[in-house]
Image (cartoon, helix red, strand yellow):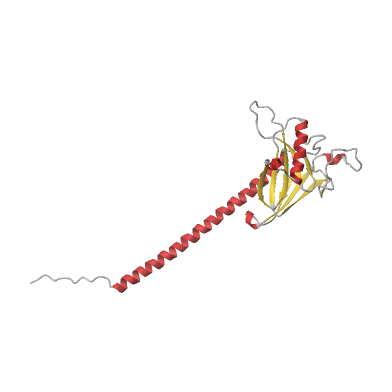
Amino acid sequence: MKPSQKQQRGFTLIELLIAITLMAVLAGLSWRGLDTLARTRENTQTRIQKISVVQTVLAQWQADLDAMQAVPKVSDAGVLWDGRVLRITRRASTVTATGADAGLWVVGWTQRNGQWLRWQSTAVTTSAQLQQAWRQAERWGQNPSTDDRVFETVLLPLKQWQLSYFRGNAWSNPLSSAATSDTSSPGASASNNTPPDAIRLLIDVPAHSGLSGRLTLDWVRPNFSNTKS
């Protein structure tokens, strides 16, 4: 007797085509899912980076005000807003090789061409240098030269910004209580030659900056104690 031979049967062409089609569909769906996941991750990472930039800029704003230093006959209150640029005299945070005081910086904040900008002078140690840097910061905010722009940093896109000072237990326009270095002039007030108790910053940022809408940030003078009701 001959041993029984099993008849072997392979896949038909139609079955192979169906299997290949199904695998192609599954591969396409998987690729679309991976692509969507990658795009979502990329968009999320981009947004996080933009928000981080905004946080860094606002931290720099706080640091400038925290280090504010009033200087008689230059920046009596340590800060001055002229309607276009906010100028601040602050302690320099750099450290000299000998460990001596690095002096002061003059810092300016302004908006130009839809961008928020910051300007910072080199460290100054004499009254003449400080007055020159103070005037240069004002010129930079009004009509900057090429030399002035060397010291500026573009921070982030900005629609507009507003400032308010807190003095006398009330918020007011900084121009209405602007500090003046000449208390003998008519209408000058000695109280305006002191730093404001607090400064409120309102900024409107566009959507492509990572945040959209209005942000409010209040800075309070470190040694301020409000005992009024």
Decide if residue 10 is on the left or right side of residue 188. left
Q: What residue lies at 71% left-to-right and 50% top-to-bottom?
A: 112
Please report the residue visible at 64 percent of the width from the left and 49 percent of the height from the top.
54
| Residue 105 or residue 168, whichever sits in front | 105
View extreme (right): residue? 186
Residue at the spot x=52%, y=56% of the render?
A: 41
Q: Residue 211's spot in the image, x, y percent? A: 64, 55
Seen from this angle, which residue lies furthest front? 146
Q: Residue 20, position in %: x, y?
A: 35, 68
Q: Residue at x 75, y 46 (%)?
A: 143
- Report the front residue among 90 and 227: 90
Residue 168 appears in which quarter of the rendering? top right
Image quarter hosting the N terminus: bottom left
Is 150 positioned to the left or the right of 227 in the image?
Answer: left
Q: Quadrant of residue 64?
A: top right
Please say if 13 is above or below 87: below
Residue 187, by quadrant, is top right
Give the total of numbered labels: 0
Which residue appears farthest toward the bottom when viewing the image?
14
